[in-house]
Image (cartoon, grey):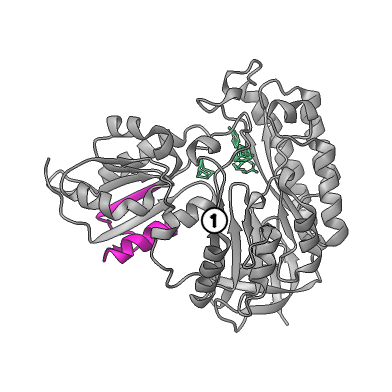
């Protein structure tokens, strides 16, 4: 075992969902609390954390090619390379293979164990190769340092894991069972986020609307109870949540959309397919119709709600007619934006062994048709917003002199030029619609 010099700089690269982004930020803060500094842009870091995603294939292959690139680009004359740690969902699913295949990787750490990074790092510096993919009973959240400075729009993980076991999905295996963080901890963390500069908080979970807890008086509450509590924070202007599951879309949460002004008019509610036979084979526990009824109820209390979803094309056995049902559902909803994916067979999931795996060319064609329809609707939604006056939370500077970027209440990317600062909530008129963003004027 040869010792390594303790790292002075780090870089964390996160892939995948927003929960990974949140975890990446927390790992960065944890390394910062150990006196390790973020490496300047474009410069070599002594420690590189690859915070990986396992949701679709090639994810693991991407990890190996990233490792290769780090060694090649940043390798040192003495033959050493930066200390590489693989974190996230590929680490959880394939930690042993990574250790066996990539000798330059010194640490493998799963999504529920990263609060132990400092200890792992000490061992790695001593020359050990360390793997920790435990899902310990003590939660990582209790062991993480307090947050100091955050962006105007901050993430707060309130729930982790998934018990739904959709037949195509790895998340129940990589993130474990559904666990809700306690109410008091979340209220406390939200206070700290606001003190550290957050004006908007997005509550995160793989099934965020499955969150349950007890309020300050010991009464059982769901996500809407937490949202109502956070809405009382004076300096918090906006609340969002993602990702939700149709089954957990309770009456109380729907009502909150009509009653809590700080809850933004945006709902990301994945549906995956418009065919009931496919939905059943996916183990989705909702039908196309029950999904549409939920959207009707949300629209009844919040008519301007912007809707978003996730779709998978080419699930095993999906026929042309079943795919057409997905297109019909898209037409019926009129989404503001969406994510759509080709089905990817994931090792260990039931769907990977199903008959009727769909040819790549068929999937390509279906994805293109679906995306054409979704892009059409997104542009239509953006065009329909023109002339509206709304608030934008300024998140960062744009590429052009004086340009500022932020989000509308409906989560559209908005750009404008004018006197405002990052973190300001400004009133604008939406003036020019593109497919992916809107140009606005300060009013
Ligand atoms: N918990 C969330 C989704 C998490 S994964 C939910 O159920 O809504 C994000 C999206 O990735 C899913 O909604 C699905 O559309 C897509 N996805 C998951 N597994 C996939 C697979 N094996 N192939 C293709 N897309 C997949
Ligand atoms: Fe995956 Fe389904 Fe759970 Fe979402 S609900 S994380 S798609 S198993
Ligand atoms: Fe990917 Fe893990 Fe998120 S597999 S989508 S990073 S939960």
Q: Residue 434 in magenta?
A: no
What residue lies at 50% left-to-right and 72% top-to-bottom? 192
Indicate the position of residue 242 as horizontal and vertical percent values: 63, 54
Up the image or down, 272 lies above or below 112; here it is: above
What residue lies at 63% left-to-right and 33% top-to-bottom? 166
From the image, tell me which residue sits under label 1. 181
Depth check: give the residue in front, 438 or 197: 197
Up the image or down, 131 lies above or below 335; here it is: above
What residue lies at 36% left-to-right and 42% top-to-bottom? 66
Indicate the position of residue 288 as horizontal and vertical percent values: 81, 37
What residue lies at 28% left-to-right and 30% top-to-bottom? 100
- Locate residue 321: give its quadrant: top right
As helix, strand or loop, the secondary structure at mark 1 comes to: loop
**Residue 303 in view in this figure:** no
Depth check: give the residue in front, 181 or 275: 181
Q: Which residues are magenta?
A: 24-50
Indicate the position of residue 77 as horizontal and vertical percent values: 14, 48
The 10 Å Cα crowd at callout 1, few under 14, some 14 to 19, many 20 or more, is some
């Amino acid at each position: 075992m040869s010792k390594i010099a303790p790292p002075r700089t780090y870089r964390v690269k996160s892939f995948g969902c927003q929960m990974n982004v949140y975890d990446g930020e927390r790992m960065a803060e944890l390394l910062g609390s150990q006196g390790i500094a973020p490496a300047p842009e474009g410069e070599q870091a002594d420690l590189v954390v690859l915070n990986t995603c396992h949701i679709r294939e090639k994810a693991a292959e991407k990890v190996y090619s990233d490792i290769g690139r780090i060694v090649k680009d940043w390798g040192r004359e003495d033959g050493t390379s930066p200390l590489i740690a693989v974190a996230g969902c590929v680490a959880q699913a394939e930690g042993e293979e990574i250790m066996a295949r990539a000798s330059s990787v010194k640490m493998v750490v799963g999504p529920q164990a990263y609060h132990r990074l400092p200890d792992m790092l000490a061992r790695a510096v001593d020359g050990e190769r360390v793997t920790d993919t435990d899902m310990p009973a003590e939660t990582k959240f209790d062991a993480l340092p307090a947050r100091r400075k955050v962006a105007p729009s901050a993430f707060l993980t309130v729930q982790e894991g998934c018990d739904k076991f959709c037949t195509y999905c790895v998340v129940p295996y990589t993130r474990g069972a559904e666990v809700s963080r306690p109410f008091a901890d979340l209220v406390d963390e939200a206070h700290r986020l606001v003190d550290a500069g957050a004006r908007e908080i997005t509550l995160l979970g793989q099934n965020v609307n499955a969150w349950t807890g007890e309020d300050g008086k010991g009464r059982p509450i769901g996500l809407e109870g937490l949202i109502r509590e956070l809405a009382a924070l004076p300096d918090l202007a906006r609340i969002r949540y993602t990702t939700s599951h149709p089954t957990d879309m309770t009456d109380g949460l729907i009502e909150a959309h009509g009653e809590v002004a700080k809850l933004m008019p945006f709902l990301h509610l994945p549906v995956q397919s418009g065919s009931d036979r496919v939905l059943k084979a996916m183990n989705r526990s909702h039908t196309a119709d029950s999904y549409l009824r939920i959207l009707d109820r949300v629209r009844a209390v919040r008519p301007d709600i912007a809707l978003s979803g996730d779709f998978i094309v080419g699930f095993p056995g999906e026929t042309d007619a079943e795919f057409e049902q997905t297109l019909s559902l898209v037409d019926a909803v009129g989404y503001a934006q969406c994510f759509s994916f080709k089905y990817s067979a994931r090792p260990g999931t039931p769907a990977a062994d199903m008959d009727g795996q769909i040819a790549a060319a068929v999937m390509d064609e279906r994805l293109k048709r679906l995306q054409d329809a979704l892009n059409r609707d997104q542009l239509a939604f953006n065009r329909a917003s023109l002339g509206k006056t709304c608030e934008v939370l300024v998140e960062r500077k744009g590429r052009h002199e004086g340009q500022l970027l932020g989000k509308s209440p409906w989560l559209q990317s908005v750009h404008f030029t004018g006197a405002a600062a990052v973190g300001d909530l400004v009133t604008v008129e939406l003036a020019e619609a593109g497919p992916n963003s809107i140009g606005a004027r300060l009013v």
